[in-house]
Amino acid sequence: MVDLSRRIVAEALGTAMLVATVVGSGIMADHLTHDTALALLGNTIPTGAILVVLITILGPISGAHFNPAVTLVFALRREIETHTAVAYVLAQIVGGIAGTLLAHAMFELPVLQVSQHVRTGNGQWVAEIVATFGLVFTILAGLRARPDSIPWLVGLYITAAYWFTASTSFANPAVAIARALSNTFAGIRPTDLPGFIVAELLGAIIATALAGWLLATPKPVTSLKAAE
């Protein structure tokens, strides 16, 4: 097993690169077009693509969580120790914030910002429950069916979820926190964070419970009587 320090760095680096892609592509898209749908498409494709890359290259080191909701799931399943899970979450949050600051620096924007982008309401919260549920279920079902396809499954799911959820599928508390520090296309007001984070964690827990039942390995038949 890779030592904890390298796993933590991998989680911080992966989340930083993910957020830099989300925020940076949003800024670029907003600069290039005034068409909101086209800008969203310009934000979607890079996000799905970078997830495939990051999970492929960093998965063998840390498992490529890059998401406190995903880390929570593996902690609940006792596949990661509590102290490691806490370290992962802190690394993800710090990495995500670093990714936002880096995106601002690349586009010569004020590095420190606070978002004014309103994202709140029942529809947004339901969308985040659905988005995170789908992400976690995709991961758990993918690990059962095709572990080698996880990078593509996650990248494609997020690409789709950008468009079928009202919230554009944040599905990640660390990314949400980082995006609250960007007053750009990808931003979210800090006051809207609690609703998003609660919804994301709830979606992850529901997916974990359903996957635990739906994907359970059938018990083997142990006697002729049972077989009858």
Image (tube, helix red, strand yellow):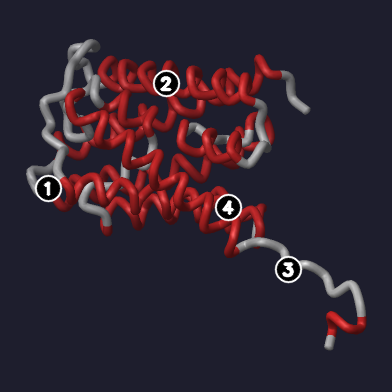
Would you say the residues marked 1 and 4 are in contact, meaning their CB atoms lie under 8 Å apart?
Answer: no
In the rendered image, the residue lying farthest to the left is 34
Would you say the residues marked 3 and 2 are in contact, meaning their CB atoms lie under 8 Å apart?
Answer: no
Mark number, residue 140: 4
Q: Residues within 10 Å of mark 2 (few under 14, many from 20)?
A: many
Q: Could you tell me the amino acid type at mark 4? A: Leu
Which label lies toward us, 3 or 4? 3
Judging by the rendered image, the residue that carries numbered circle 3 is 218
Q: Position of residue 182 (x, y in %)?
A: 22, 23
Residue in the picture at 25% in, 29% down: 193
Left/right placement of residue 197 relative to residue 182 reads right
Q: Is residue 136 above or below residue 110?
A: below
Q: Quadrant of the N terminus?
A: top right
Badge count = 4
Q: Position of residue 93 (x, y in %)?
A: 42, 21
Residue in the picture at 29% in, 51% down: 162
Judging by the rendered image, the residue that carries numbered circle 2 is 93
Secondary structure of the residue carrying numbered label 3 = loop
Left/right placement of residue 186 relative to residue 60 reads left
Seen from the viewer's position, the closer of residues 54 and 222 is 222
**Cα distance, mark 3 to mark 2?**
38 Å
Q: Position of residue 3 (x, y in %)?
A: 73, 19
Which label lies toward us, 1 or 4? 4
**Cα distance, mark 1 to mark 2?**
28 Å
Which label lies toward us, 3 or 1? 3
Mark number, residue 36: 1
**Cα distance, mark 1 to mark 4?**
33 Å
Residue in the picture at 66% in, 32% down: 80
Q: Is residue 167 above or below residue 221?
A: above
Tell which circle, 3 or 2, labels the residue nearer the N-terminal end.
2
